Amino acid sequence: MIGKLNHVAIAVPDLKAAADIYRNTLGAKVSAEEQQPEHGVTTVFIELPNTKIELLGALGENSPIDKFLERNPGGGIHHLCYEVDDITTAKDKLVADGIRVLGDGEPKIGAHGKPVLFLHPKDFSGTLVELEQA
Amino acid sequence: MIGKLNHVAIAVPDLKAAADIYRNTLGAKVSAEEQQPEHGVTTVFIELPNTKIELLGALGENSPIDKFLERNPGGGIHHLCYEVDDITTAKDKLVADGIRVLGDGEPKIGAHGKPVLFLHPKDFSGTLVELEQA
């Protein structure tokens, strides 16, 4: 079912400092900051030859990463995003297998403009999993 | 400097259960378990089209993931591994930039038989970073 690893998301307390380390010390290709007010985050992408790292900074009040940053004030890996061909087929299979889909259980349009689902970390050995229709 | 994301490592309390979820529910290609007594872990690889997920189970006494699993009893993402062309050049650049290399600061032969370094998570927004000479 799952295809490529679309990205690894890392929540960070200081987006500029994190981007600078990837750009200057690790010598990676780093995008400009992009504010996503409807998702409550500002994103920076580290473009690797085979996948992406998404740095997430909190934006506005009640950002979805606020609680994570309270528990991990220095930042940390927030989720993994795997690609799927069809998000509805994926959802049906997951629900049949007893996996908990977060929110109301229906796909939403994610930060990249594509349908996504988030799956409960307790069902994946402590890893928050995002599925994105590629 | 950094190239491909070689793998994402996830430390898990129950390697068989974690492998089964990836194999059966997520439909991924999953390797057999491989014991690595010299590294204190048993590994299972999830082979994705563009990278790998490395599931790590503790092996023997004093496994290097014991403390992580004490803090995260359900498991969690343990580190990211980026490829570099030359581990010594990478190390020199990192040290010059004030990055803390773990252990004695010298490359070691990692679980894949290649020279690796681990970098302090506090220097990378809470992410333990492994560099592997590709």
Image: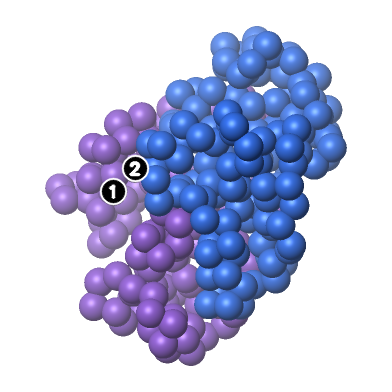
Chain colours: A blue, B purple
| Residue pictured at 48% horizontal, 72% vertical | B132
Q: Which residue is mark 1?
A: B65
Q: In the structure shown, which secondary structural element does the residue marked by tag 1 occupy?
A: loop
| Quadrant housing the C terminus of chain B | bottom right
Which chain is mark 1 on? B
Labels 1 and 2 within one chain: yes
The residue furthest left is B61
- The 10 Å Cα crowd at callout 1, few under 14, some 14 to 19, many 20 or more, is many
* Residue A51 appears in the rendering: no
| Residue pictured at 84% horizontal, 37% vertical | A113
Percent of width and height locating residue B7:
54, 56
Closer to the N terminus: mark 1 or mark 2? 2
As drawn, the label of residue A87 is: none
| Residue pictured at 52% horizontal, 85% vertical | B86
Percent of width and height locating residue A77:
50, 46
Q: Amino acid at mark 1?
A: Ile
On the picture, is A87 further left or further right than A56? right
Is A80 drawn above or below residue B84 in the view shown? Answer: above
- The 10 Å Cα crowd at callout 2, few under 14, some 14 to 19, many 20 or more, is many
As drawn, the label of residue B57 is: 2
Percent of width and height locating residue A74:
40, 51
Which chain is mark 2 on? B
Q: Residue A130 occupies which quadrant of the picture?
A: top right
On the picture, is A35 further left or further right than B120? right
Q: Nearer the viewer, residue B37 or B57?
A: B57
